[in-house]
Amino acid sequence: MANDLLVQGRECGECTVCCVNLTINDPELEKLPGVKCPHMIERGGCKIYSSRPKTCKDWYCMWRFMPGLDDSWRPDLKGIVIKRVFDNIPAGYENKIALEFEVIGSRKVIHNVDFINTLGGYIAAGFPCFLSYGKPRTATTMVFLNELLIGAVSSQDLSLIRDKLSLAYKKCVKTPKDKIRIEDGEIKIIPAGKR
Ligand code: SF4
Ligand code: SF4
């Protein structure tokens, strides 16, 4: 997303989620997902801000671009980071921006009414949405939510939405994760079960 689409006046503040969450494979820095960057300042900020790698300069989570999300959606506060998805969008959904809701804190967030209302709004509007969960040094497992939830969203059945989100979350957590390594300057995905 182009930086001129960032929400005006919105800043990262004390959030450092992407300094842990991102995979970085730049000449200045190699870092695996779920691993704290050594340059991170705990309460927000970067010790090498002016010379930070290109990946850091270019990347923002979707909260920085979505004016409809209020300040409670800052990833460290909400426990969810929203990322844009570019690959493996299911057929029929390719024309809209795809959103990954990655749980990074307590699983309770998937039952949060604000989260459900927001997610339900995007699903009702046809935006492809995924729930995801990762572990350090692994790829996230994503579950496509639209077809799972559209009936419950249409009937505004909160209890059914919660049940289905719980199933999706369990699947995200229990599915074996592909490992990520950086070797010789290349990101390598090691399929789950292989070393
Ligand atoms: S270099 Fe700075 S901006 Fe990039 S991940 Fe590390 S702390 Fe964050
Ligand atoms: S996750 Fe989003 S809000 Fe948090 S530091 Fe990164 S870009 Fe900023």
Image (cartoon, rainbow, N blue to C red):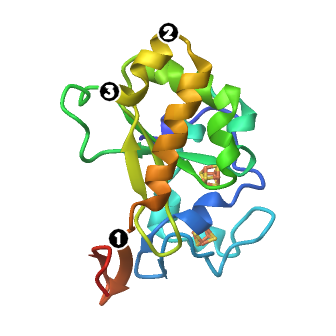
Q: Residues within 10 Å of mark 2 (few under 14, many from 20)?
A: few
Q: Can you give x and y, in whole percent of width and height, for residue 116 in the image?
A: 60, 27
Q: Which mark sits nearer the N-terminus, 1 or 3?
A: 3
Type of the residue with mark 3? Lys
Read off the residue under disc 3: 96
Read off the residue under disc 2: 155
Residue 160 in sight from this viewpoint:
yes
Q: Which element is circle 2 on? A: loop
User: What is the quadrant of the N terminus in the image?
Assistant: top left
The correct choice, above or below, for 174 with respect to 192 in the image is: above
Cβ–Cβ under 8 Å for marks 2 and 1? no
Q: Quadrant of residue 2?
A: top left
Q: Can you give x and y, in whole percent of width and height, for residue 129 in the image?
A: 41, 34
Tell me if 107 is positioned left or right of 60 in this view: right
Tell me if 88 is positioned left or right of 176 in this view: left
Q: Which element is circle 3 on? A: loop
Q: Residues within 10 Å of mark 1 (few under 14, many from 20)?
A: many
Residue mark closest to the camera, 2 vs 1 = 2
Read off the residue under disc 1: 178
Type of the residue with mark 1? Asp
Between the residue at mark 1 and the residue at mark 3, the CA separation in whole angstroms equals 27 Å
The correct choice, above or below, for 159 with respect to 32 in the image is: above
Q: Can you give x and y, in whole percent of width and height, for residue 126 in the image?
A: 36, 20
Tell me if 26 is positioned left or right of 45 in this view: left
The residue at the point 23 percent across, 36 percent down is 90
Q: Can you give x and y, in whole percent of width and height, for residue 21 in the image?
A: 55, 64
The residue at the point 53 percent across, 73 percent down is 136
The residue at the point 34 percent across, 27 percent down is 147
Q: Which element is circle 1 on? A: loop
For the view shown, which residue lies furthest in the left direction? 91
Type of the residue with mark 2? Ser
The residue at the point 26 percent across, 39 percent down is 89
